[in-house]
Every structure is written in C-alpha cells, then in structure tokens.
Amino acid sequence: MSAAMSNTIVSNNPGDGIVVQSLLNVTLTVSIDNTTVSGNGVGIGGFDNARVLLSRSTIVRNSSYGINNGTSPSSFYTFQNNQLFLNGTDLVGSALTPVSFH
C-alpha cells in the first residue's frame, strides 16, 4: 500500500504532525515531498515496517522531536535535501537512510 503527500503544510498540532505506521503486517510506503511540518509536538513519526521517503521538506520548531524514526528495520529514507532545525530534538531513533535520485 502506498500514499504520497506533497506541497503540504502540517502545523500547530499538539501531538504528531504526520504519522506513518504499518499495522497488521502490511507494508505502507509514504512519499513526503515539499512539505512543511512545524509547531507540532512531533513533526514526522515513522513506525514498525513502514517505509517513509522524505524529500525537499522543512521540519522545524516541533516541540518534542522533528523526526521520530521507529521503523524496523530502519526504512526512513532521505534524499538529503531537507531542512531539519530548531526542534526539541531534531532526530530520535535510527539515523535516516540516505538515498540518491535515479
């Protein structure tokens, strides 16, 4: 199962801004592109066997975490063109996996 989010603003939620979580052993792949995530408790959370692809996005001023990578095995990918700054903690969990454009 897959979904895409682009050209989006997710802001001012007291809890999580974006959560990507696979349940019932279904792999969910979500592409997040050109999205601003700010002023939330947690900016983006990825959990379980979900796959998250992050590109050209700004994750800033989220009070707890910018990104919470709880994917297992680590399947939160970055195209390394994102801005992650001024969050309570910018990244918690596994490091994001760098990938390149094809």
Image (cartoon, rainbow, N blue to C red):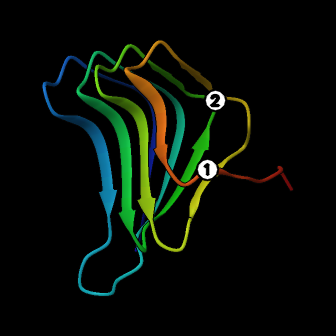
The correct choice, above or below, for 89 with respect to 26 in the image is above
In the depicted structure, whether residue 70 falls above or below residue 32: below
Asked which secondary structure carries label 1, the reply is loop
Residue 3 in sight from this viewpoint: no
Tell me the residue at 58%/43% (across/down): 54
Residue 48 in view of the camera: yes
Residue 27 at x, y percent in the picture? 41, 78
The local secondary structure at tag 2 comes to loop
| Residue 66 placement, left or right of 98 | left
Question: Which label sits in the foreground, 2 or 1?
Answer: 1
Residue in the foreground of this view, choosing between 88 and 56: 88
The quadrant in which residue 81 appears is top right
- Residue type at the position of mark 2: Arg
Quadrant assignment, res 63: top left
Query: Could you tell me which residue is drawn at 25 percent across and 77 percent down?
Result: 23
- Sequence-wise, the earlier of marks 2 and 1 is 2
Q: Which residue is drawn at 43% across and 68% down?
A: 50
Q: Residues within 10 Å of mark 1 (few under 14, many from 20)?
A: some
Q: Which of 73 and 102 is in front in this view?
A: 73
Count all numbered tags in the image, as a single digit: 2
- Examine the image and state in which quarter residue 70 appears: bottom left
Quadrant of image for the C terminus:
bottom right
Is residue 57 left or right of 27 when viewed as pictured?
right
Q: Position of residue 55 (x, y in %)?
A: 63, 38
Q: Residue at x 47, y 12 (%)?
A: 86
Identify residue for label 2: 56
Residue 82 sits above or below residue 99 on the image:
above
At which x and y percent is residue 30? Answer: 46, 57
Residue type (three-letter) at the residue carrying disc 1: Ala
Query: Is 63 left or right of 7, judged from the image as shown?
Result: left
Q: Name the residue under label 1.
A: 95
Relative to 31, say whether 60 is above or below: above
